[in-house]
Amino acid sequence: MKKVGIIMGSDSDLPIIRKATDTLKGLEIPFEVHIYSAHRTPVEARDFALAARDNGFGVLIAAAGMAAHLAGAIAANTTLPVIGIPCQSSVLDGMDALLSTVMMPTGIPVATVAINGGGNAALLAAQILAVEDADLARRLDDKRASDAAKVLEKDAAVMQQL
């Protein structure tokens, strides 16, 4: 199975990344996590992206706040799918990161999830990998069924209370 590469711009993004890693662990998807900054370690970020396919990755997730150039910098150096997670900061409540991540120029796409959307980034990565992996597709189907059952249990509990 291909791995998911997760890159965060700073260790302050770790709580958001944990949502992604917890989801990937639950789906039994291998991953690696690294801290590379588009601005402070641009050579390392570029090298990681350039070698990602050869190193067994099938999709990359990049999380960054504020200027949030990391996902775009990664996407500029690979043709693997890149999913951007805009991270909330004290500045502009994360809207700056969202707009920086989603507004990529034609030719360098970045799929973008919600601000702090680590869980959905992992699920989107899993869906991309599941295109060629029937076992993973089944695990995703099972997760959706389990999630739906939990909602219906809560519905029944609320109906009993009221």
Image (tube, rainbow, N blue to C red):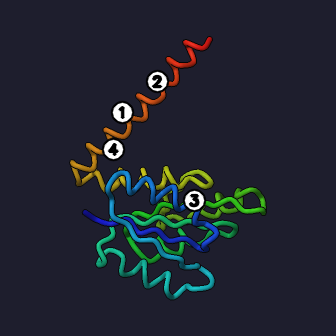
* Residue positioned 52% across, 20% down in the render: 155
Which sits earlier in the primary sequence, circle 4 or circle 1? Answer: 4
The CA distance from mark 2 to mark 4 is 20 Å
Callout 2: SS: helix
Q: Is residue 49 above or below residue 125?
A: below
The CA distance from mark 4 to mark 3 is 21 Å
* Residue positioned 36% across, 53% down in the render: 126
Q: Is residue 42 above or below residue 99?
A: below
Callout 1: SS: helix
Please name the amino acid that badge 1 sits on: Ala
The CA distance from mark 3 to mark 2 is 28 Å
Q: Residue furthest bottom?
A: 43
- Does residue 48 appear left or right of residue 142 in this picture? right
| Circle 3 or circle 2, nearest the eye | 2
Which sits earlier in the primary sequence, circle 3 or circle 2? Answer: 3
- Residue assigned mark 1: 145
The CA distance from mark 2 to mark 1 is 12 Å
Q: Count numbered badges in the picture.
A: 4
* Residue positioned 31% across, 39% down in the render: 141
Callout 3: SS: helix
Which sits earlier in the primary sequence, circle 2 or circle 4? Answer: 4
Q: Which percent across, then down, holds residue 92? A: 77, 59
Q: Which percent across, then down, holds residue 84? A: 53, 61
Task: In this rendered view, identify the residue nearer to me: 32 or 126.
Answer: 32
Please name the amino acid that badge 3 sits on: Ile
Q: Which percent across, then down, holds residue 117? A: 56, 52
Q: Is residue 146 above or below residue 133?
A: above
Which sits earlier in the primary sequence, circle 4 or circle 3? Answer: 3
| Residue contact at pointers 1 and 3, CB within 8 angstroms | no
Question: What numbered label is drawn on residue 140?
Answer: 4
Q: Quadrant of residue 31?
A: bottom left
Question: What numbered label is drawn on residue 16?
Answer: 3
